[in-house]
């Protein structure tokens, strides 16, 4: 039996996808990358923006035709969209080819659900929000050297634009011991990059800086990253910890979303641009080589030209290595869905283009600052690797993937750097 699992959305959802694969392998499925030959197709979905959802419906529409060739094909939808009542209605009304729908709380019940389906029982009963952390499900990881490790689930922040708190439920954190045990095992298996995940790792319930210190003390040759950090909870202690711990990448993903205090307020982000700059300045002082990345929403309801210029100013001042930028997408059920919006789509896309142009210029300038320096690089394939700040480096020779090497940066070629392995 072959299973095809396609995951959309964030790293946390990718980790869920890996748990789903682990469940499937346990009950005898083999995994395939080719949906046409699969006996089970699962779409592990994301609800954060409308276009993410539309893509899923497109995929389901195509999968329907595979049923004509394989009568026993099971099609399932899980992940964040499965926790949206509107999606469920739409699937029931227009996508009868979907045999099984289950929310993010039901991954452990997948074997049972599949057994039911095979007895011709339609299954759609598992949408309750998680109230616990997943433990012991295992993760079938694609990479042999990069591993993501969720440390907390859910979100309590209710940013006014965001669906995540509604589909992922309230915050809950994994125990320190369980996390350390898992990372120790991953490192002993040869994993070199550990990515700690949570919607807001700074509200990890059992002292995030202390967790980082304990991870830093694990023996072995590896580095560790974390995301996302919410600026409202980003403490000096956290930055001091990043500065002190040799195994923590000198990279902070600190989504600002907007540079306008008015917009930040209407987003319910609970910080001001001044507070944000304070964190950035402190980090730059403590960690001179620190790299920042960010998420930014362009075209939040009624974002004025002045608001937008304030965002550009933040980008200029912080000098991010990279920004993940999104045009605001209205999510029904969220508070911002009721906000008036007088900005046209054209204005939004124009702003987006200006933002991208500015960021590209800054990325290139940041990369240039590394020329002549010696940095650590994690080799990802053949002669391509990435720095702690996630900049791509082309090496002068091929090194086995998954090694962390010291590299002298010798030059810059468009968005990537060139370097010699020492
Ligand atoms: N918890 C993380 C973000 C998770 S969602 C954090 O707070 O940083 C990832 C990103 O998607 C967000 O940072 C935001 O920039 C974007 N996003 C969320 N909801 C959105 C919406 N309705 N429209 C456009 N972008 C959105
Ligand atoms: Fe969404 Fe805000 Fe929670 Fe991030 S912190 S997941 S943006 S509600
Ligand atoms: Fe999307 Fe769910 Fe992540 S909505 S961004 S997959 S938590």
Image: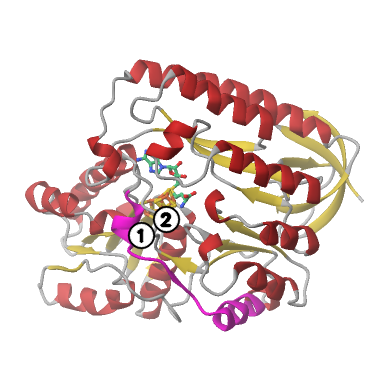
Number of the label disc, if any, that sits on residue 33: 2
> Is ligand 3 closer than 8 angstroms to the Cβ of mark 2?
no
162 with respect to 178 (left or right): left
Whole-percent x, y for residue 234 in the image: 60, 55
Task: Determine if the magenta segment contains residue 196.
Answer: no
On the question of residue 252 being in view, the answer is yes
Say which residue appears at 49% left-offset and 38% top-offset. Answer: 257
55 with respect to 418 (left or right): left
Q: Is residue 180 above or below residue 127?
A: below
Q: Nearer the viewer, residue 115 or 228?
A: 228
Q: Give the main secondary structure, helix, strand or loop, of the magenta stretch.
A: helix
Give the mark, 1 or 2, whose residue is nearer the N terminus. Answer: 1
On the question of residue 384 being in view, the answer is no
Q: Secondary structure at mark 2?
A: loop
Task: Determine if the magenta segment contains residue 181.
Answer: yes
Q: Nearer the viewer, residue 196 or 96?
A: 196
As drawn, the residue found furthest toward the left would be: 93
Which quarter of the rendering shows the N terminus?
Answer: bottom left
Q: Which residues are magenta?
A: 163-185
Q: Are marks 1 and 2 in contact (CB under 8 Å)?
A: yes
Say which residue appears at 70% left-offset and 56% top-offset. Answer: 239
Q: Is residue 272 above or below residue 156?
A: above
Say which residue appears at 23% left-offset and 74% top-offset. Answer: 114
Q: Residues within 10 Å of mark 2 (few under 14, many from 20)?
A: few
Say which residue appears at 28% left-offset and 63% top-offset. Answer: 40
Q: Secondary structure at mark 1?
A: strand
> Is ligand 3 closer than 8 angstroms to the Cβ of mark 1?
no
The residue to which callout 1 is attached is 4
């Amino acid at each position: 039996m072959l299973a095809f699992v396609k995951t959309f959305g964030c790293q946390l959802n990718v980790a869920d996808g890996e748990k789903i694969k682990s469940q499937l392998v346990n009950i005898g499925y083999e995994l395939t990358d080719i949906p046409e030959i699969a006996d089970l197709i699962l779409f592990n979905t994301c609800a954060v923006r409308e276009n993410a959802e539309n893509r899923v419906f497109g995929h389901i529409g195509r999968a329907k035709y595979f049923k004509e060739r394989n009568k026993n094909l099971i099609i399932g939808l899980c992940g964040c969209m499965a926790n949206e009542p509107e999606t469920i209605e739409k699937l029931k009304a227009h996508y009868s080819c979907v045999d099984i729908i289950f929310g993010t709380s039901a991954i452990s019940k997948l074997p049972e659900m599949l057994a039911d389906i095979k007895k011709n029982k339609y299954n759609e009963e598992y949408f309750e929000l998680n109230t616990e952390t997943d433990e012991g499900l295992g993760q079938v990881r694609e990479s042999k050297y990069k591993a993501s490790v969720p440390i907390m689930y859910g979100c309590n922040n209710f940013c006014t634009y965001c669906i995540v708190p509604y589909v992922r439920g309230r915050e809950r954190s994994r125990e320190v011991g369980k996390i350390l045990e898992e990372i120790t095992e991953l490192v002993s298996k040869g994993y070199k990059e550990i990515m700690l995940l949570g919607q807001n790792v700074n509200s990890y319930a059992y002292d995030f800086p202390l967790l980082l210190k304990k991870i830093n003390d694990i023996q072995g040759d590896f580095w560790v990253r974390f995301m996302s950090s919410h600026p409202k909870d980003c403490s000096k202690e956290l930055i001091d910890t990043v500065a002190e711990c040799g195994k923590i990448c000198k990279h902070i993903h600190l989504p600002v979303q907007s540079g306008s205090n008015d917009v930040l307020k209407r987003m319910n982000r609970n910080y001001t641009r001044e507070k944000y700059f304070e964190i950035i300045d402190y980090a730059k002082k403590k960690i001179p080589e620190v790299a920042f990345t960010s998420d930014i929403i362009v075209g939040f309801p009624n974002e004025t030209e002045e608001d937008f210029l304030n965002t550009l100013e933040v980008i200029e001042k912080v000098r991010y290595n990279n920004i993940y930028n999104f045009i605001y997408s209205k999510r029904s059920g969220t508070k911002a869905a009721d906000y008036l919006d007088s900005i046209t789509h054209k204005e939004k896309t124009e702003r987006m283009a200006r933002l991208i142009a500015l960021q590209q210029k800054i990325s290139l300038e940041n990369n240039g600052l590394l020329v002549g320096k010696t940095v650590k690089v994690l080799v990802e394939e053949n002669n391509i690797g990435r720095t702690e700040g996630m900049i791509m480096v082309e090496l002068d020779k091929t090194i086995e993937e998954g090694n962390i090497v010291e590299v002298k940066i010798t030059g810059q070629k468009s968005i990537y750097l060139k370097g010699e392995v020492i």
